[in-house]
Image (cartoon, rainbow, N blue to C red):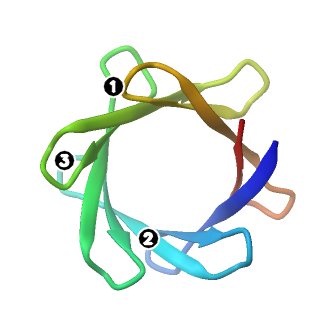
């Protein structure tokens, strides 16, 4: 299990994403329909995330193709899965807020 980065809230309700070295790699902003639109470090749209029907969050690329999903874990974390349903990692709450991301 290796830490791959972390995410924290920005000033205007967005979520900033950082790699394991602390460099900003992107951000997510709320969209009109209640989901999140995801952008890379240069501000280019790379996809979006929307609430799933049975809970959790479904992730889509910029073309609208589903790339995976995230669902709550048993111990207050979030598990991440690829489009085939294979677990790719998990996130846990950070000590000072935000989330720490790990590959499994």
Estimate how packed mark 2 is, as few (under 14), some (14 to 19) or many (20 or more) residues with alpha carbons within 10 Å: many
5 shown above or below 72: below
Estimate how packed mark 3 is, as few (under 14), some (14 to 19) or many (20 or more) residues with alpha carbons within 10 Å: few
32 left or right, relative to 52: left
SS at circle 1: loop
Q: Which residue carries the number 1 mark?
A: 52
Q: Which residue carries the number 2 mark?
A: 27
Disc 2 versus disc 3: nearer the observer:
2
The furthest residue to the top: 54
17 left or right, relative to 97: left
Looking at the image, is mark 2 or mark 1 earlier in the sequence? 2
- For the residues marked 2 and 3, what is the alpha-carbon distance in whole angstroms? 18 Å
* Residue 49 position by quadrant: top left
Residue 26 position, x and y percent, is 45, 73
8 shown above or below 102: below
Residue at point 60% right, 26% down? 72
Residue at point 52% right, 81% down? 11
Looking at the image, is mark 1 or mark 3 earlier in the sequence? 3
Q: Quadrant of the C terminus?
A: top right
Q: Which residue carries the number 3 mark?
A: 33
Residue 24 position, x and y percent, is 56, 80
SS at circle 2: strand
């Amino acid at each position: 299990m290796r830490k791959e980065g972390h995410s924290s809230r920005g000033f205007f309700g967005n979520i900033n994403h950082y790699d394991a070295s602390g460099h900003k790699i992107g951000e997510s902003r709320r969209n009109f329909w209640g989901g999140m639109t995801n952008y890379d470090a240069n501000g280019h749209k790379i996809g979006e995330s929307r609430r799933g029907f049975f809970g959790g969050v479904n992730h889509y690329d910029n073309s609208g193709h589903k790339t995976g999903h995230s669902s709550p874990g048993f111990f207050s974390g979030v598990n991440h899965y690829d489009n085939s349903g294979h677990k790719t990692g998990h996130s846990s709450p950070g000590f000072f807020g935000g989330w720490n991301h790990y590959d499994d």
